[in-house]
Image (tube, coloured by chain):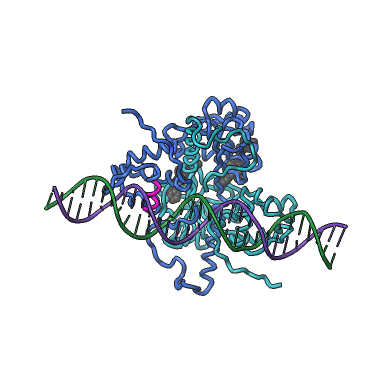
Chain colours: A cyan, B blue, C green, D purple
Amino acid sequence: MSQQVPALPDLPEATVARLPEYLRALHHLAESGNDTVSSEALAGAAGVNSAKLRKDLSHLGSYGTRGVGYDVALLIDQIEYVLGLTQRRAVALVGVGNLGHALAGYAGFGSRGFRIAALFDADPGRVGEHINGLVVRHIDELPEIAEAESIAIGVIATPATAAQSVADRLVAAGVTSILNFAPCVLSVPDGVDVRKVDLAIELQILSFHEHRKASLIALPAAGGLTALPGGLAATGTEEAVGS
Amino acid sequence: MSQQVPALPDLPEATVARLPEYLRALHHLAESGNDTVSSEALAGAAGVNSAKLRKDLSHLGSYGTRGVGYDVALLIDQIEYVLGLTQRRAVALVGVGNLGHALAGYAGFGSRGFRIAALFDADPGRVGEHINGLVVRHIDELPEIAEAESIAIGVIATPATAAQSVADRLVAAGVTSILNFAPCVLSVPDGVDVRKVDLAIELQILSFHEHRKASLIALPAAGGLTALPGGLAATGTEEAVGS
DNA sequence: CGCGATTTGTGCACGACTTCACAAGCGCCT
DNA sequence: AGGCGCTTGTGAAGTCGTGCACAAATCGCG
Ligand SMILES: NC(=O)c1ccc[n+]([C@@H]2O[C@H](COP(=O)([O-])OP(=O)(O)OC[C@H]3O[C@@H](n4cnc5c(N)ncnc54)[C@H](O)[C@@H]3O)[C@@H](O)[C@H]2O)c1
Ligand SMILES: NC(=O)c1ccc[n+]([C@@H]2O[C@H](COP(=O)([O-])OP(=O)(O)OC[C@H]3O[C@@H](n4cnc5c(N)ncnc54)[C@H](O)[C@@H]3O)[C@@H](O)[C@H]2O)c1
């Protein structure tokens, strides 16, 4: 049969953000020997509502069988195709400091569709260092190496002061997706995607909820609330807070 | 004057997630000697739309002056109050491996409202190790130390296989907010908040957009699009993708 | 072959969030 | 004192995402 390549549907952003979760859960299920899975079971494993899961998957096309569920292997293929994981994408990591070292040594990188193709730093003392089979190159070498390795994704793990300059150099070298660990806003041309990870922001969001929980307890039971928030209920599922 | 404590408004979750960004931008502005800032300027510095910023801030109350802007110092105080950052919150870090080491040595932790109060690991070989002035304790000591240090926030940096068990122990020790770096879904009682950070998911989302950009270029210009996506426009602001 | 049990795919209503657009408020200058 | 320019705060409309509830589809079994 001829390999049919479905046109890329344009998925809601919220759905795209959840597909990787489903993919992880599916890989787990496959390893456990499951051939098919119901939306209910998969939703449980991924920590979402089953209706939401079905709607998400329906955007990819109809790959389930009513009365049975989804074929695990087929669904993995479909999601990996949509996410563009059929090719192992090359990633450049810039800034091999404290955090950069941990990232460079992270195995989960390789097992989930990516390949760290090069490490860069500006500190001459670090250039030449070997990490996990890769040698740290000077940031000035970025253009040639990015070209040679077809690098389209860059990870920034430098201090915030250097991040914008590094982003500019990445973009100039042809990178069109950036994952930024530095706590700052990056400015990039249209067509370049940026996502950020900021530990302190995550903690501050948690802090807000701590603050709220505390002030609710301090107050005498107001409004409809009669018991302590949270109470004693020890039911199963995760209480996701925010995105 | 008597310290007036405004009741905690219940903010939209999306607003809560942006307040830390505003806070970071405000600290920058304060360091640069700015006393006041307009919504337009602050929005630019935080990478958001100015209308959104004004609506977000309006949820905290009216702390701006029409025709002038916002008082930087006052706004910092307000946001820090709402986020519960007036006290320096104690954080426990569990799993002092590759990633845990980087986190333990991270300065941005301390400068943005938090204090790493204790490090834990299960590996006897690691227990006793000194990192950044802290000694690594055995995970079994968690209950007493969490109590003694009033720890309400826990960070999990163990392998995914251990994460659920660690989460259970954190909750048992009184922790009510968890930041999870392990790639797995955690199940916790009501009243406990969980946020996760998963590097691979971030990269896979970027990969999706790479895939889409590539397929758009491959296709002959369809629909309303006449030029290459992204084109040559090198305008300023960041193209945020997703959350 | 038909029936009941099961599970998907989706129409629909609702809620959350975003963005526009503008009146109201403030300070400055004349 | 009055007018003018600037900026906030917010109503209202639009967009996006969620979750219910159910019809349609499939399987297994008698
Ligand atoms: N360490 C953490 O756990 C952690 C957590 C969250 C966020 N961050 C953020 O990640 C970034 C890195 O943190 P870190 O602790 O690894 O810092 P670090 O100082 O240990 O490492 C930064 C590295 O970047 C290199 N560098 C500086 N300027 C450069 C440039 N122009 N080009 C290339 N390389 C350059 C430095 O030589 C250094 O090796 C910081 O922005 C930090 O705020 C770190
Ligand atoms: N290294 C990275 O850059 C990176 C990036 C993203 C996510 N992660 C995730 O973060 C987690 C940690 O990664 P890592 O590279 O640091 O792994 P690691 O193996 O280097 O470190 C894990 C540490 O956890 C400890 N540990 C194991 N079981 C424990 C338990 N029950 N209680 C307490 N401590 C226990 C181990 O002794 C070890 O020190 C993993 O889940 C990984 O997938 C890591």
Image spot of residue C5 (x, y percent): 77, 54
Q: Which residues are magenta?
A: B50-56
Q: Quadrant of residue B146?
A: top right
Image height of B227 relative to A73, above or below: below
- Residue shown at the point (71%, 60%) measured from the top left: A66
Residue B55 forms part of the magenta stretch: yes
Image height of B219 relative to B155, above or below: below
Image height of B158 relative to A61, above or below: above
Q: Quadrant of residue C20?
A: bottom left
Residue B174 forms part of the magenta stretch: no
Image height of A160 relative to A193, above or below: above
Image spot of residue A153 (x, y percent): 51, 57
Question: In the picture provided, is A50 more to the left or to the right than A101?
Answer: right
Q: Main secondary structure of the magenta part?
A: helix
Image spot of residue B87 (x, y percent): 43, 31
Residue at the bottom extreme? B220
